[in-house]
Image: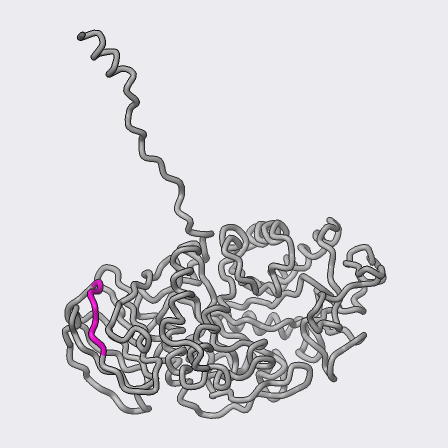
Amino acid sequence: MRFLIALAALTTPLPALAQTVEPYTGRDHVEWSRDAVIYQINTRQFTPEGTLAAAEAELPRLKALGVDILWLMPIHPIGEVNRKGTLGSPYSVTDYKAVRAELGTMDDLKSFVDAAHAQGMKVILDWVANHTAWDHPWASEHPEWYERNWQGNFRSTPYWDWSDIIDLDYSQVALRNEMREALKFWVREADIDGYRADVAGYIPPDFWEDVRADLEAIKPVWMLAEYPDRDAHMVSFDSTYAWDWEKALRQIAAGTGNATSLYGFYSEHASMWPSGAQRMIFTSNHDENSWAGTAYERLGEALPNAFVLLFTSEGIPLLYNGQEAGLDKRLEFFERDPIVWREHENARIFKRLIEFRDANPVLHNAPWGAPMVHVKNSEESKVFSFVRRADDDGVLVLQNYSNEEVTVTLSDFPGAGRWIEFHHDLPEGVAVRPSPVTLEKGTEVSLAPWSSRIYTVFD
């Protein structure tokens, strides 16, 4: 009997040892992206002159606003064959190693970058790798580098109205090598800090992996992909477009959604995406402004809440040039149409929100900031509420996405206790000294229509 018991003990399987794999965090980022805010410059429209030299004169103002990464739309010469409008699209390129005369010279670009660096800001260039202008020299010198349609002719991107460009063929190794050299050129020659990759997903991912390795061999860089690709964050890109964030807000503004419309974006963000992914959120950019409408047209009464969400929720925020001046017109894309600069409350609100974001580490970009935790309330269809909490730092945000005043009762949330309200939209010269309030499960909070309330941990 003892033998049988001993034999059974020997043959009984041992408990499996716990096994883990590396967390799905995404690639590492440069330290200077920790609390960075992106600012897109449509150089043609940014100043009355429309030049890099004139844009450089605006850098102290942008520094004071609080932005960190300056994204320049394509700086290269534009094709003339099949050109759209008088000046053409900046995304129709004829020379990847030149600055177009409309904007200035190579020395002007270098001066802009040096001046930005001197003020603690970084510069990324918009890069158009998917296609060229019809009259790019490659079209005659290396016609094998281009895609062909069923008739055997050069192919524009199908279905879209992109008749001024022709698509490149990334099965061609020589093309890949030439494009990689051009990308390295601007980092070496102008000391830029990275790229925004136009329609990045139209190009094989292994190309971008090779590019990232090339650039990192020169200096640490930061890369933004115009594409919502989760796995691009693992190797090639620090940031990708989060179009669904703006779409959810647009649905709310149009009355086809409510506060719960934001759940889809934030649920997928928490469940699907690398925890260190810096997903770019925005209320406007050059495409949205020119083709879909101004932020005021698209987001309507939800826009003030969207601005608060831009700087307090997870995601790296983008401002489009002119938004601080209340840009309320669609800028022409193929013509000169300078921004009309004016004093506007947006500049003051953006500055306060950026300073608030900088001062609260829980609001910093991934992976440094704290994750959002949904705070349930008694009016979920009207009020979106969340907290970001870590150590002694915490920010609680409540937003009313309805046209009526709402009083909500809070559910349980991390950090219940004494909080102090931050007023992001005070008029110039007005100050308040808020007293600490107790916020916990069962607390009632009132919100005006289409408004936000922001709290920070008091103790």
Q: Residue 415 placed where, x, y %?
A: 19, 64
Q: Residue 338 placed where, x, y %?
A: 60, 88
Q: Can residue 119 be seen at all in this image of the molecule?
A: no
Q: From which residue to which does the magenta span run?
A: 408-414
Q: Residue 257 placed where, x, y %?
A: 42, 76
Quarter of the picture holding the N terminus = top left
- Please give left or right for residue 60 compared with residue 405 in the image: right
Front residue of 421 and 302: 302
- Please give left or right for residue 91 compared with residue 192 in the image: right
As drawn, which residue projects farthest toward the front? 1
Q: Residue 343 placed where, x, y %?
A: 44, 92
Q: Quadrant of the rendered structure where residue 407 is?
A: bottom left
Q: Is residue 22 magenta?
A: no
Q: Quadrant of the rendered structure where residue 436 is?
A: bottom left
Task: Examine the rendered structure and indicate whether residue 418 appears above or below residue 294.
Answer: above
- Please give left or right for residue 25 compared with residue 126 in the image: left
Front residue of 400 and 202: 400
- Which secondary structure type mostly characterizes the magenta part of the structure? loop
Q: Quadrant of the rendered structure where residue 94 is?
A: bottom right
Q: Can residue 458 be seen at all in this image of the molecule?
A: yes
Quarter of the picture holding the C terminus = bottom left
Task: Examine the rendered structure and indicate whether residue 27 appears above or below residue 453.
Answer: above
- Please give left or right for residue 411 compared with residue 109 in the image: left
The residue that appears at 33% across and 75% down in the rendered structure is 381
The residue that appears at 60% across and 52% down in the rendered structure is 205
The residue that appears at 72% across and 69% down in the rendered structure is 93
